[in-house]
Amino acid sequence: MSIYRLAQPLLFALDAERAHELGLKAIELAYRSGLNPLLATRPQPLPTRVFGIDFPNPVGLAAGLDKNAAHIDALGSLGFGFIEVGTITPRPQAGNPKPRMFRLADRQAVINRLGFNNRGVDALVRNIECSRFQGVLGINIGRNKETPNEHAVDDYRLCLQRVYPLATYITINISSPNTQGLRDLQEETALARFIGTLREDQERLAAVHGKRKPMLLKIAPDLTPTEMDGIAEVLLASGIDGLICTNTTIDRHVIAGHELANEAGGLSGRPLMARSTAVLRGMHERLGERVPIIGVGGILGGADAAAKFDAGAQLVQFYSGMIYRGPELIGECVEALRGRW
């Protein structure tokens, strides 16, 4: 039994956000003490090439766990094929009032309304510059709460410019349900204008730095077929490099009757799996192989990772799976995908 399995009951006795912070500190301590093998066995390599990037394996850490890139050395040592940090905003912000994170342990789920709490893009850049991490690093960027949508692109442009030299790829997050109005940017006309501006910046930065960094879009699971049609058209027309399906859901039908069902925020974990995978499958049907997709949402076992691949993903990520399964889930997912090449 791993150390995480032993520690999990103690962590689950704490407030969810406090347990999150302590869990990261414990992973950091294990890394600095050389005790990582007690957390999980690193998986054997499963080289995967997507977006022109060589990944040591196709299983990554989703954004949200390490918002400020303060623990990328420790997290990277666990065996992930890639790490995505953020969401980061131009200016520091405290996020929404506490409590704002809730475990639904009997459903293997989490509800969060954190609200892009982070120390700002400059702090993230400093953390990365001080790290030793040499792996694949995605940086997820967003807008500050007080920035209206008509000026949102300016926040993304600033973050894109600041993180571009340090990122392996950049994710544009317009799908969090915890920043008011953010998901409105997924509307086809607004999205076309928004992505067009950022694509111009991406190509300009590629020329300045002599290296083109892929840019991905992360979308919500709460989309109608018509909305998916519009997003697909924009992505194909813009030449964006990739798509992440999906963020958390605001739908509560799958946890109806639960004592925490009425808590506001995004729902992740097991109840998200079906909806997230349906959107992934739908977007793959619309995009084919022209826009590679990362599947995220509800992965708590190797079979879940395999289901994402069956639906059209070329890479997968998890976050809530780290809460309920710990680092051993990395290797389990890698092995479940090993026979799929």
Image: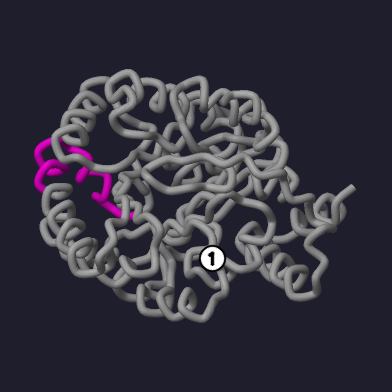
Magenta stretch holds residue 89: no
What is the secondary structure assignment of the residue under circle 1?
loop
Magenta stretch holds residue 191: yes
Q: Is 279 drawn above or below residue 150 in the view shown? A: above
Magenta segment, prevailing SS (helix, strand or loop): helix
Q: Can you tell which quarter of the image residue 71 is in? A: bottom right
Q: Which residue is drawn at 43% across and 32% down?
A: 251
Q: Residue at x 43, y 70 (%)?
A: 118
Q: Is 220 drawn above or below residue 264 in the view shown? A: above
How crowded pointer 1 is (Cα within 10 Å; few <14, some 14-19, many 20+) is rated as: few
Question: Disc 1 marks which residue?
Answer: 134
Q: Is 273 drawn above or below residue 102 in the view shown? A: above
Residue 64 in view here = no
**Depth check: 119 or 257 in front?**
119
Rendering coords of residue 215 (x, y %)? 30, 50
Rendering coords of residue 109 (x, y %)? 61, 40
Q: What residue type is labelled 1?
A: Gln
Rendering coords of residue 157 (x, y %)? 20, 64
Q: Give the range drawn in magenta.
A: 179-193
For the C terminus, which image quadrant?
top right
Rendering coords of residue 208 (x, y %)? 19, 69
- Given the current orientation, which residue lies at the most extreme right position? 1
Q: Can you tell which quarter of the image residue 28 is in? A: bottom right
Q: Is 300 drawn above or below residue 201 in the view shown? A: above
Q: Can you tell which quarter of the image residue 96 is in? A: bottom left
Q: Which residue is drawn at 46% across and 30% down?
A: 313
Q: On the picture, is 265 further left or further right than 77?
A: left
Q: On the picture, is 197 further left or further right than 329?
A: left
Residue 314 in view here = yes
